[in-house]
Image (spheres, rainbow, N blue to C red):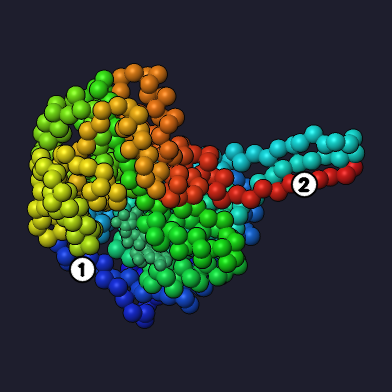
């Protein structure tokens, strides 16, 4: 596929990049290798479209988002198949992601109509003070490969709903879903220039956008390392930024937890997308007294997971995205084993990019898996003696995105949730993400929120108007 600037397919004649299916290694398509020129063209198109798009009534933009939502629903299966082919995740998860991605369009089509202002009482009778909200302007979005649709719509839907226009650089490994979404946006009547997608050289494209004073906002999901680079680059032109970065999610299972639920939710959280999600459970802390029961039940549940080509209807876990991802998981397993952890099930067993889901027990805080995001199907279990110890260990990280806590005691749940230094706490819940709630991290997991009314504020500027009468 070519890329998409100003409502037109573009980029023919450029060098191309192969898009491969990680399950088979087959090249399924190619995309152009865009760079500085194309990034500038996209920014020009978005800047040109800004005045008319932001000048529409919120209800008119909402209608167009609704049409986009309907077209995505009509093309649901084709989008899901494309996603599985380029990303590897199971077709069930891909279908779920298209529904999830589309829920942001639906929700923001409504929320865009509720961008309210304020009036402030003045100090003198001859003044009236107002506060209004206006779109920030052209928004650059850089998105990762793990959620090829949802990370686009979670950014683009609120941006469009309030009148911003967008320039998007999807991950090189998964550009096709993004391009198909853009194609449907035009069919939905979203005007040319409002959504532009450029594929290619990430650092050149992002450099051009960082330097461009017409681009007023940068929103990114991906690694903390790249997020830091973008944060410093965006400072040159003092852009607004949102960063959704790495996580290192702890799961704390207290003695009084419903163990069956804790196991089920931990499996859902840990092995979702093969463990390649920034909110995936990364380390599991279990009260010493229930370790055996929890571990046995987790082992049984994990052994039922089927690894295979994501297109097979009975697959639960597809391939990892690439060799580096496989190597990282294997290195974490080997490191844990070499320091005395016990393999409960799985192990560093690999076939192409497929990895056997693994549980290890007896892990300690100095092992790599307890200090870095594994981003793969490894569940390390460690025990704790007291709640204070569990919370201290859960918080003892530079990350602060998602955390999970299991207990039947509601008061304790709230008390301990308040102590967790995380943007998201799943209480007896391994799947808290939803369009109407704020998603984002504390500490080095990021800045800003996506989802909910919090996510729309990220695309608005505040204007104070003082009227002397
Ligand atoms: N928070 C999250 O959801 C995610 C976290 N991660 C974490 O990051 C690790 C590495 O994954 P990886 O795919 O390399 O993540 P990256 O952060 O490298 O990639 C995410 C996006 O950033 C782009 N990018 C990469 N380098 C630059 C740059 N110098 N300037 C501007 N944009 C850039 C990528 O483009 P391109 O693809 O063209 O390189 C992609 O669009 C994972 O193992 C995981 O730990 C990864 C993905 C998502
Ligand atoms: O940042 C990610 O890894 C994708 C978000 C997953 C979610 O919305 O639950």
Residue 433, x across and y down, in percent? 38, 38
Viewer-side residue, 355 vs 393: 393
- Which quadrant holds the N terminus? bottom left
Q: Bin the neighbour count of mark 2 within 10 Å (Cα to Cα): few under 14, some 14-19, many 20 and up.
A: few
Residue 431's place in the image compared with 326, above or below, is: above
Tell me what residue is drawn at x 67 percent, y 48 percent: 462
Residue 303 in which image quadrant:
top left
Counting the numbered discs, the total is 2
> From this viewpoint, is residue 438 visible?
yes
Q: What quarter of the picture does the C terminus occupy?
A: top right
Please give the label number shown on residue 27: 1
Q: Where is residue 322 in the image (x, y as percent from the top left)?
A: 22, 61
**Near-viewer residue (88 or 400):** 400
Please tell me in which quadrant of the rendered image residue 393 appears.
top left
Q: Quadrant of ligand 1?
A: bottom left
Residue 258 placement (x, y as % from top left):
24, 22
- Closer to us: 69 or 37: 37
Q: Which mark is residue 465?
A: 2
Horizontally, is 413 left or right of 135 in the view? left
Mark 1 neighbour density, 10 Å: few (under 14) some (14–19) many (20 or more)? some
**CA distance separating discs 2 and 1:** 56 Å
């Amino acid at each position: 596929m070519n890329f998409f600037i100003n409502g037109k397919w573009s980029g023919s004649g450029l060098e191309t990049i192969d898009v491969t299916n990680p399950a088979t290694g087959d090249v399924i398509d190619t995309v152009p290798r865009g760079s500085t020129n194309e990034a500038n063209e996209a920014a020009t198109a978005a800047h040109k479209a800004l005045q008319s798009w932001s000048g529409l009534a919120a209800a008119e933009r909402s209608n167009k988002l609704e049409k986009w939502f309907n077209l995505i629903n009509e093309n649901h299966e084709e989008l899901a198949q494309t996603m599985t082919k380029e990303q590897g995740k199971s077709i069930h998860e891909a279908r779920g992601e298209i529904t999830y991605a589309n829920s942001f369009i639906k929700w923001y089509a409504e929320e865009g109509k509720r961008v309210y202002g304020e009036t402030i009482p003045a100090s003198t009778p001859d003044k009236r003070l107002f506060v209004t909200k206006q779109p920030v302007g052209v928004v650059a979005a850089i998105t990762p490969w793990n959620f090829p649709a949802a990370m686009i719509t979670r950014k683009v839907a609120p941006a469009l709903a309030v009148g911003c226009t967008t320039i998007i650089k999807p991950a090189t490994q998964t550009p096709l879903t993004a391009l198909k979404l853009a194609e449907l946006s035009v069919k939905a009547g979203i005007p040319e220039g409002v959504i532009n997608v450029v594929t290619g050289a990430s650092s050149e494209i992002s450099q051009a956008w960082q330097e461009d004073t017409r681009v007023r906002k940068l929103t990114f999901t991906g690694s903390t390392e790249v997020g830091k680079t973008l944060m410093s680059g965006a400072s040159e032109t003092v852009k607004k930024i949102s960063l959704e970065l790495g996580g290192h999610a702890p799961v704390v299972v207290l003695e009084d937890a419903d163990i069956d639920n804790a196991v089920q939710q931990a499996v859902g959280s840990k092995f979702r997308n093969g463990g390649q999600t920034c909110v995936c459970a990364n380390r599991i802390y279990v009260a010493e007294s229930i370790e055996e029961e929890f571990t046995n039940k987790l082992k049984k549940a994990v052994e039922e997971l089927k690894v295979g080509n994501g297109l097979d209807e009975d697959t639960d876990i597809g391939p990892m995205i690439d060799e580096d991802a496989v190597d990282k998981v294997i290195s974490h397993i080997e490191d844990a084993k070499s320091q005395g952890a016990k393999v409960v099930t799985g192990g560093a067993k690999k076939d192409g990019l497929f990895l056997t889901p693994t549980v290890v027990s007896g892990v300690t805080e100095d092992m790599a898996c307890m200090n870095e995001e594994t981003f793969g199907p490894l569940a390390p279990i460690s025990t704790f003696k007291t709640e204070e110890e569990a919370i201290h260990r859960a918080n003892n990280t530079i990350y602060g995105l998602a955390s999970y806590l299991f207990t039947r005691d509601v008061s304790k749940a709230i008390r301990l949730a308040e102590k967790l230094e995380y943007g998201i706490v799943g209480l007896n819940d391994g799947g808290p993400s939803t369009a109407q709630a704020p998603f984002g991290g504390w500490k080095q997991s990021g800045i800003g929120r996506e989802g909910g009314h919090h996510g729309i504020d990220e695309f608005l500027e505040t204007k104070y108007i003082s009227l002397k009468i």
